[in-house]
Image (cartoon, rainbow, N blue to C red):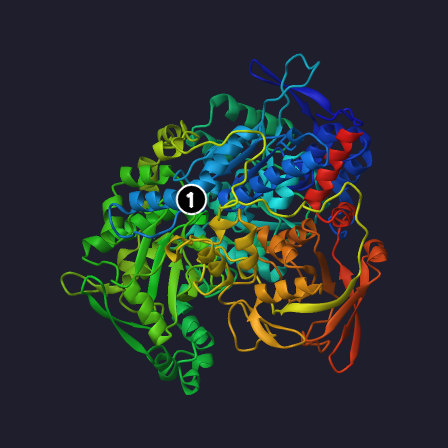
């Protein structure tokens, strides 16, 4: 631990008979720095700087700058944040371990010690993204899906077991245990660390706040526990593992004041959808969001975690709540050791970080306020989580959006009518325009139409961590079952809890049988439908959707509903609370007014409405009180790292260096460091670049690097089949992120991508220029690479929103993309681009591709990049085929000096590798 101590902050904390060393925030008072009104999140950062002050990476001036934070000032001061730990999930964790393994190979080639490539702090990986919903609606669904998961992924899992033995400070939570974020808040999060002494400290360990970065954007779920952390790309996470601080500008902090309490009938899901809508409208990208106000006193921690989880959906870096009495109650409920709980409370109180009704109100950059009593039942969709729809208006909203989602098979005249002015006969006619008769594999017959709900999934870390909505869903199922209601036969239902504890308390509440009666059988413990692992629809239903070009829907209790993500057959996707997921499984359609239309017919022939099966909050609370127990958490997490026999029987390769198998289609050594030298490469201007893709607004990382199924006619499919892999064994893009050959071919391969170079076409296609031939984006990119032609991507607002996946930057980099020009970026993706040596450029205010007359057929020059790294401004010259030229200025989005260094080195991992190799040679 660094020993600067310029402010004399080192001291001792006694907790009972135990002694700890700490850095006291109050010590700054003697230097004239009043930190009592700093936001909670910034005080956590301030302690981090005090503890890591070394005069180089962290200086006394950095500490003064943060302690004297001006809430209204624009971010300009760079600081270095050193997280206490790193958390991974397997979709991003496997490529992270692949990168570390190939860095060891490169270190050996450069003459250094491969063992220097090793995590220097705790790293925990939870395998949760690989289970798919193949089997559903049966009592053996869980075992079937688990067996298929191991068959598909045994090679990846064996690789991770090698990582456990080859790297220090690296632990893996085996498959079928839970979702990373739920496991994090229920078990892994420390809130306060209390171990790791230093020489001469008389064996007293340091106590300090638990902080982290994670390779999943929803790492922010832990913010509900008062733990500061956020999602980063795998590239940044790898650097953090290797001891690199996360450089950042001191952020602005938005205060979100919560008052009142949720009304009867509204859930934490409804609350978070309203919060997401408000913050996305305000604009908080790159900012911290901190919650405060009287509403915190009555807010369960699970509700706080639900809000923290959705931080990437509104663009905030984090969405944090302070530690208070509710935090302590939750730590007790989840069976944390008594000594740990006592340390958390004592440390936070000593540092002035324990929130009470008397705590000083922090100063914020700006504030929003929400009276929770005004929150209404809601959904979000059909394409983005910030597009909240009141449940009372859901039918009207769906019918309004329907024409935009229709396929070519619906006559244009059907797209007209009074849709924009309300639900009328013309709008209803649109929904009824096409009906397709389905004869299922078991002989059942029914009709599908536009708006049919074909997937209803209780899934995702966002909501399955919250007993209130899970018990609420069980009670809806119980009441519906008692009345004789069941799911519609065309609805694929699934229950994928975020931890085994959920099934324990659902069983204790006697709700499992009722959920199963409606088709909500356990399908696995992991991130399923929300990540795109919804599995295939039954063949007869999939065929009907294709034949009728139907716009069918999914309803899921998740946090992501981007185009092409949930299921290739679902064009409309809605986020909803688990109780509403059950309701829509019963109704079977989106074009229904659940307030005024019956949801079904009871066994005695009566119309049943949603209000007839909706539980009141007292019912839910009473059942939680008697069913959710600390012993359940203690039992399920006692052997969390052990795994079942399938896990234990996996082979473990040996050796410090990984023995790459050239025949593998899952794990390959990527070429990131093949031509790397210790010498710093020169900054190269960009000449004669072509546009690989000209894109619009809200291009997500799912558009750039899809995680779901691999289409049988895609470049990735062609590669796999040429490698001897049958289509039934393709698995998903997410599961194959350890193979750069697949991931390059999957870049920009989302089936809903719309590239303006090929108007009217959906999918990963472009035109190769100057010949104009239409082909896949991958094939065009390789053709440009072979000809020595650099490429760029041009896009609109919110480029790279969504998941933190590093392959959305790795893929373009390997395909020869030198720069991206957009109207705005989401934080994580911009960092990922820099981490891979791709230059992020941003149009000046008011400029867009359309306003500048850019068609994507031009050639581009970006000169003077060496100087631009200092000025952060550059000029771009576009030249059309007929000789017309247009020059325009752009901002160079290298926001900190450290980001400039990363770009100079060709990426963050190249920077780290050169530092380590040079140190050894010196």
> Residue at horizontal 35%, vertical 52%?
133
Q: Is residue 706 visible?
A: yes
Crowd class of label 1 (few under 14; some 14 to 19; many from 20; radius 10 Å) = some
Quarter of the picture containing the N terminus is: top right
- Position of residue 695 measured from the top left corner of the image (x, y, whole percent): 61, 69
Q: What residue would you read off at disc 1?
A: 153
- The answer to whether residue 170 is left or right of residue 791 is left
Residue 849 pos. (x, y %): 69, 73
Q: Residue at x 71, y 43 (%)?
A: 910
The residue drawn where x is 71% and y is 39% is 912
Residue 471 percent coordinates (x, y): 33, 46
Which residue corresponds to the image point at 79% horizontal and 76% vertical from the top-left?
886
Residue 673 drawn above or below residue 555: above
Q: Quadrant of residue 427?
A: bottom left
Q: Nearer the viewer, residue 860 or 902?
A: 860
Asked whether residue 127 appears in the rendered view, the answer is: no
| 473 versus 340 height, above or below | below
Q: Residue furthest bottom?
A: 413
**Observer-nearest residue: 281 or 294?**
281
Location of residue 87 by image quarter:
top right
In percent of width and height, residue 432 lies at: 32, 78
| Quarter of the figure with residue 5 | top right
Q: Is residue 723 left or right of residue 468?
A: right
**Circle 1: element type:** helix
Does residue 21 appear left or right of residue 16 in this picture? right
Q: Quadrant of the C terminus?
A: top right
């Amino acid at each position: 631990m660094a020993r600067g101590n310029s402010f004399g902050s080192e001291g001792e904390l006694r907790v009972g008979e135990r002694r700890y060393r700490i850095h006291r925030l109050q010590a700054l008072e003697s230097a004239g720095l009043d930190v009592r009104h700093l936001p909670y999140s910034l005080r956590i950062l301030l302690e981090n700087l005090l503890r890591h002050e070394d005069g180089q990476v962290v200086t006394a001036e950095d500490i003064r700058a943060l302690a004297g934070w001006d809430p209204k000032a624009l971010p300009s001061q760079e600081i270095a944040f050193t997280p206490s730990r790193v958390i991974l999930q397997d979709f991003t964790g496997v490529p992270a371990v692949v990168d570390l393994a190939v860095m060891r190979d490169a270190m050996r080639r450069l003459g250094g010690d491969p063992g220097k490539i090793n995590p220097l702090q705790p790293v925990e990986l939870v395998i949760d993204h690989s289970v798919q919903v193949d089997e559903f609606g049966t009592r053996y669904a869980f075992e079937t899906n688990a067996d298929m998961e191991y068959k598909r992924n045994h090679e990846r899992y064996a690789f991770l077991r090698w990582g456990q033995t080859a790297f220090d400070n690296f632990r893996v939570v085996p498959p079928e245990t839970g979702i990373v974020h739920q496991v994090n808040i229920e078990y892994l999060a420390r809130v306060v660390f209390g171990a790791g002494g230093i020489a001469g400290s008389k064996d007293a360990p340091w106590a300090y706040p638990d902080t982290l970065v994670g390779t999943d954007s929803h790492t922010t779920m832990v913010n509900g526990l008062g733990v500061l952390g956020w999602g980063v790309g795998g590239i940044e996470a790898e650097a953090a593992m290797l001891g690199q601080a996360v450089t950042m500008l001191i952020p602005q902090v938005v205060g979100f004041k919560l008052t009142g309490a949720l009304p009867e009938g509204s859930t934490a899901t409804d609350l978070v959808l309203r919060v997401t809508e408000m913050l996305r409208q305000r604009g908080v990208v790159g900012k911290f969001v901190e919650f405060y106000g009287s509403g915190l006193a009555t807010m369960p921690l699970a509700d706080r975690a639900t809000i923290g989880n959705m931080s990437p959906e509104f663009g905030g870096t984090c969405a944090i709540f302070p530690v208070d009495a509710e935090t302590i109650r939750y730590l007790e409920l989840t069976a944390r050791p008594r000594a740990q709980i006592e340390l958390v409370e004592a440390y936070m109180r000593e540092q002035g970080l324990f929130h009470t009704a008397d705590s000083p109100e922090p100063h914020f950059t700006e504030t929003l306020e929400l009276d929770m009593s005004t929150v209404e039942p809601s959904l979000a969709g059909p394409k983005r989580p910030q597009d909240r729809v009141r449940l009372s208006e859901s039918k009207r909203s769906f019918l309004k959006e329907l024409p935009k989602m229709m396929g070519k098979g619906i006559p244009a005249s059907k797209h007209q009518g009074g849709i924009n002015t309300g639900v009328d006969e013309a709008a209803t006619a649109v929904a009824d325009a096409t009906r397709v008769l389905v004869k299922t594999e078991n002989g059942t017959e029914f009709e599908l139409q536009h708006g049919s709900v074909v997937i209803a999934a209780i899934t995702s870390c966002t909501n399955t961590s919250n007993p209130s909505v899970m018990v609420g869903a069980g009670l809806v199922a119980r009441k519906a079952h008692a009345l004789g209601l069941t799911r519609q036969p065309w609805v694929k239902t699934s229950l994928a809890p975020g931890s085994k504890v959920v099934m324990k308390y659902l069983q204790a509440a006697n709700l499992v049988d009722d959920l199963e009666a409606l088709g909500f059988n356990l399908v696995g413990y992991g991130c399923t439908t929300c990540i795109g692992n919804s599995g295939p629809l039954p063949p007869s239903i999939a065929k009907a959707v294709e034949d009728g070009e139907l716009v069918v829907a999914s309803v899921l209790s998740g946090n992501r509903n981007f185009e092409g993500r949930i299921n290739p057959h679902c064009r409309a996707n809605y986020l909803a609370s688990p109780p509403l997921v059950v309701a829509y499984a019963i109704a079977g359609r989106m074009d229904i007014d659940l307030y005024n239309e019956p949801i079904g017919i009871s066994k005695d022939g009566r119309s049943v409405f949603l209000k007839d099966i909706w539980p009141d909050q007292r019912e839910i609370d009473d059942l939680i009180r008697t069913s959710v127990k600390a012993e359940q958490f203690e039992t399920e997490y006692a052997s969390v790292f052990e795994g079942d026999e399938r896990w234990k029987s996996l082979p473990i390769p040996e050796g410090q260096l990984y023995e790459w198998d050239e025949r593998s289609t899952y794990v390959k050594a990527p070429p990131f460091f093949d031509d790397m030298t210790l010498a710093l490469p020169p900054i190269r201007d960009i000449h004669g670049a072509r546009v690989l893709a000209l894109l619009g607004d809200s291009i997500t990382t799912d558009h750039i690097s899809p995680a779901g199924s691999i289409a049988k006619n895609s470049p990735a499919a062609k590669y796999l089949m040429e490698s001897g892999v049958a289509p039934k064994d393709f698995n998903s893009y997410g599961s194959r992120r350890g193979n750069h050959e697949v991931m390059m071919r999957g870049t920009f391969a989302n089936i809903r991508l719309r590239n303006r170079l090929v108007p009217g076409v959906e999918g990963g296609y472009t035109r190769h220029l100057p010949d104009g031939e239409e082909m896949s984006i991958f094939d065009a990119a390789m053709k440009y690479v072979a000809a020595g032609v650099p490429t760029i991507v041009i896009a609109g607002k919110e480029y790279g929103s969504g998941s933190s996946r590093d392959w959305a930057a790795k893929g373009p980099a390997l395909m020869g993309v030198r720069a991206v020009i957009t109207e705005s970026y989401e934080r994580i993706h911009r960092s990922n681009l820099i981490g891979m040596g791709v230059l992020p450029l941003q149009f000046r205010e008011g400029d867009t591709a359309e306003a500048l007359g850019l068609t994507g057929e031009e050639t581009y020059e970006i000169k003077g990049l060496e100087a631009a790294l200092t000025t952060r401004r550059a000029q771009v010259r576009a030249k059309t085929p007929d000789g017309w030229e247009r020059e325009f200025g752009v901002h160079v989005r290298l926001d900190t000096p450290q980001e400039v260094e990363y770009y100079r080195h060709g990426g963050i991992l190249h920077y780290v590798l050169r530092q380590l190799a040079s140190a050894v040679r010196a």
